Amino acid sequence: MDGLRVVLLLATVSTAFAGWQETLTPAAAAPFAAVRPFQATFRFGWSNVLEAGSAEALFLYPTPSTWAVEVKGQSTGLARALWQLDATYSGSGNADSLMTDRFTQVEKYSRKAITTEAIFEPERVWRQRRVDPGERAKWKRVKWPGLRDLLAAMLFIRSQPLNPKDEVVVTVYPGDQAFLVRMRVIGKDVVALPEGSRKALKLELNIQKIVTDGERKGKLEEHRKFRSGTVWLSDDSDRIPLRAEVEVFIGFVYGELTSMRFLPAAEER
């Protein structure tokens, strides 16, 4: 009888595990044109009241089959007086599969610096996190197939047809925890930006944590700080992220495009 219970329990866990995995958007479905190389700046803030940070991004194709990105960001204004942060991110991936190869992220605060490195493989991610001063680097293996970093996830999502009510489901590893991300097209909109108004696709964002080890491996958990989110992509052939808003326990935080310049082919190398 005990053996039967174990079998039934394993079958139940397996079914629950397979349920959400079967909703993942197939990796081969990428009919939309690739992003053109660009330079862009963004600003970030809280509840449209406090501007708290800015970032500059450079996106290139070092080879026809590889994308690379460099991002530099910092806290600004009153937020910087309370919370000093300077950060850099560099990453690369496959331009055909839209999967991540690796990334390095450095966060420098007033009293410490955190360096995160990640190497992506088809069945796992290797992650090293170092805190200076005072902590040795440690490599951690996250055994989960098909994970992308944030940039590769965005590239993959924008590559989909994105017709009304379409849903794109992808697994993401930004550097600390694996997440299941669902984005559903809820309509069209017009977004007011510093450079003027832009037509946009409006997408609803939902995030859940994925348990990647232990007895509850494969289960989904609520993200306690995340409540809801909305992302606007330009409704044109480029599908550039224009704005994102995420509802958290203190209101909503936002990021939006402030300027952008597409690069000619000669500047890709």
Image (spheres, grey):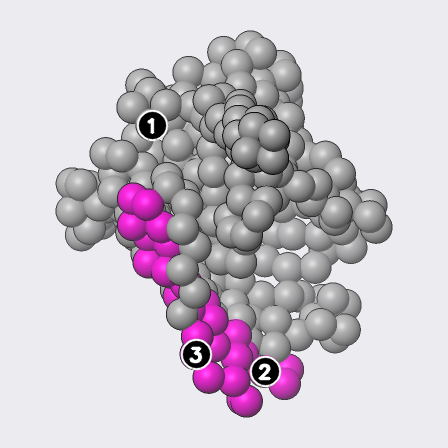
Marks 2 and 1 sit apart, C-alpha to C-alpha, by 39 Å
Tell which tag, 3 or 2, sits nearer the viewer: 3
Which of the two discs, 3 and 1, labels the residue nearer the N terminus? 1
Q: Nearer the viewer, residue 267 or 31?
A: 31
**Disc 2 marks which amino acid?**
Lys
Which of the two discs, 3 and 2, labels the residue nearer the N terminus? 2
Q: Nearer the viewer, residue 176 or 77?
A: 176
- Badge 3 crowding class, 10 Å Cα cut-off, few under 14, some 14 to 19, many 20 or more, is some
Q: Secondary structure at mark 3?
A: loop
Rendered image quadrant of residue 104: bottom left
- Badge 2 crowding class, 10 Å Cα cut-off, few under 14, some 14 to 19, many 20 or more, is few
Q: Is residue 32 left or right of residue 40?
A: left
At 58% across and 18% down in the image, what residue appears?
Answer: 185
Tell which tag, 2 or 1, sits nearer the viewer: 1
Magenta stretch: includes residue 114: yes
In the image, the segment drawn in magenta is 110-138
Residue ID for mark 3: 137
Instruction: Identify the disc placed on residue 27.
Output: 1
**Disc 1 marks which amino acid?**
Ala
Rendered image quadrant of residue 157: top left
At 63% across and 85% down in the image, what residue appears?
Answer: 111
Rendered image quadrant of residue 94: top left
Question: Where residue 135 sits: x, y (%)?
Answer: 52, 85
Instruction: Identify the disc placed on residue 112.
Output: 2
Marks 3 and 2 sit apart, C-alpha to C-alpha, by 14 Å
Q: Is residue 76 left or right of residue 195?
A: right
* Vertical relation: 67 (above or below) 98: below
